[in-house]
Amino acid sequence: MTEDQNPARLGEFNHSSIGFLPEYAAAAKALDDLIKAMQEKELFPLGQDEWLKVVRDMTAAIPFSDCCDCNSEIYISGVVPTGAKIERGWVTGVYICPECRKRWTCGWSLTVPNIQL
Ligand SMILES: [Zn+2]
């Protein structure tokens, strides 16, 4: 199959074991909202491969979320790294608070994420 015939690079999948969860739909809606925000700010188009890498990296970085102390909701839900540098088993996450725009870095062991997937 050529790229023109499948520009989304959709492969076969079955997420039925989790797809009924409202959070699954909410995550898809959030990603769609992100695409629309990027389009509004003319940060699109990313190529499909680059977009899928953004989603993959963001998802893999969730266990390394950190907190900003400006807002209790952000403190609870956490801020996912917007970048990461990995050296010798250590990840340095780069964070930008979506509420106050504060930027910071935080280091984590790659083997000790906040949650285990
Ligand atoms: Zn903040």
Image (cartoon, rainbow, N blue to C red):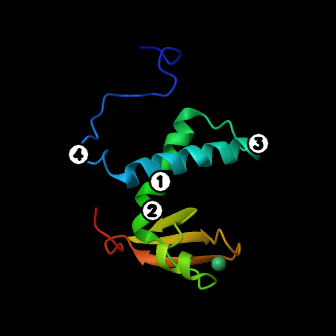
Residue lying at the far right in this picture: please name it. 41
Q: Is residue 103 left or right of residue 113?
A: right
The amino acid at mark 4 is Ser
Q: Secondary structure at mark 4?
A: loop
Residue 54 visible to the viewer: no
**Which residue is denoted by mark 3 in the rendering?**
42
Q: Nearer the viewer, residue 8 or 73?
A: 73
Q: Is residue 107 left or right of residue 24?
A: right
Mark number displayed over residue 57: 1
The image shows residue 82, relative to residue 105, as above or below, that is above
Q: Looking at the image, do the residues carrying marks 3 and 2 touch, with CB atoms under 8 Å apart?
A: no
What amino acid is at disc 3?
Glu
Mark pair 1, 2: CA separation: 6 Å
Q: What separation in Å lies between label 3 and label 2 (alpha carbons)?
A: 25 Å
- Asked which secondary structure carries label 1, the reply is helix
Q: Please name the residue that numbered disc 2 is placed on.
A: 61
Q: Is residue 1 above or below residue 38?
A: above
* Residue 73 locus on image (x, y percent): 54, 77
Determine contact: label 1, label 2, CB under 8 Å.
Answer: yes
- The answer to whether the beta carbon of the residue marked 1 is less than 8 Å from any atom of ligand 1 is no
Q: Is residue 32 above or below residue 110?
A: above
Of residues 43 and 83, the one drawn nearer to the viewer in this rendering = 43
Left or right of residue 108: residue 41: right
- Mark 3 or 4, which is nearer the eye? 4
Label 3 – label 4 distance at C-alpha: 36 Å
